[in-house]
Image (cartoon, rainbow, N blue to C red):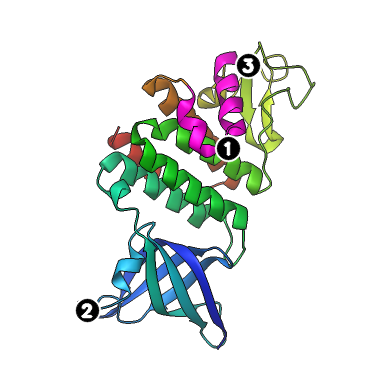
Amino acid sequence: MRSLSSRGFALSARSQGEADKIVQVYTQEWGRVRAVAKGARKPKSKLAASLELFTESSFSLNRRAGGDWFILFKAKVLDDYHDLKKDFKTISFLQVLAEILLDSLGEQEAHPDIYQLLREVLEALGQDPEAGGQVMTAFVLKFLEATGFPLELENCVECGTSLEKRGGHLIPHRGGALCGDCCATGPQRLKRGPAGLAALRRLRELPLEKAKGVKLQPAQAKDLFLTVMEYLERTVEKKFKTVEYYLKTT
């Protein structure tokens, strides 16, 4: 067996048998990893606390013979982000973050920049939960760039015309916005006016901890978040079910 050690975030956990759990963790050095946490369901398990959603821990794992699965045999909690788990709204954001990582990234693909983004977005959400909409929007925009799908928001990807005063439709397979002349119709959610595109540009440019400073009404922040989430869904060709839970909590 090959041993791995890395800090990481718990993304999901489900029961297996009488005492174990199947878990997925996003690690700094190895990306997303699936593992069996032996005995994690036992009352006195030392692993249980580290498997709570978006608890950051140091993990020690052994690779199972002949496969990509691991055995999680040791974990130490580094930060449980307890305050983020007190409110339904921030819990819903954590669930969305987990689903993004689970459905958008391959297994064992290291992205240290994304790991750092996660730490930044969790810190920003903790500082100002009410600004969660714009913070999450900024995260998704930066996540798209980090995974090789940067979103063109300045100029029409077809004719190159500036969108500063025009707006347009965000078209995933084109990698950004098309002006009204090049795309007269498109998905209504992905149609953004000049002010919406300007806000998206601003959120993408700012460090995550400053995203909360972008002045948006709650309804505007929510609308932009749903817009970038639909764009991401169409980009990765996955439907994020946790967005429905988010809508129920807001």
Q: Is residue 46 above or below residue 223?
A: below
Looking at the rendering, the stretch of residues picked out in magenta corresponds to 194-214
Query: Which residue is labeled 2 in the image?
Result: 44
SS for dot 3: loop
Residue 196 image offset from top left, x and y in percent: 55, 19
Give the amino acid at mark 3.
Gly
Q: Is residue 181 left or right of residue 138?
A: right
Give the amino acid at mark 2.
Lys
Main SS category, magenta section: helix
The quadrant where residue 150 appears: top right
Q: Are marks 1 and 2 in contact (CB under 8 Å)?
A: no
Q: Counting other residues with Cα less than 10 Å from the Cα at mark 1, is it few (<14), some (14-19), or many (20 or more)?
A: many
Q: Exactly how many numbered labels are in the figure? A: 3
- Residue 167's label in the rendered image is 3
> Residue 75 or 94: which is nearer the viewer?
75
Residue 110 image offset from top left, x and y in percent: 62, 62
Give the amino acid at mark 1.
Leu
**Closer to the camera: disc 3 or disc 1?**
1
Q: How far apart, in angstroms, are the residues tagged by discs 3 and 2?
A: 57 Å
Q: How far apart, in angstroms, are the residues tagged by discs 3 and 1?
A: 17 Å
Query: Which residue is labeled 1 in the image?
Result: 141
> Residue at 61% across / 58% down in the picture?
112
Residue 232 image offset from top left, x and y in percent: 55, 40
Name the image quarter holding the C terminus. top left
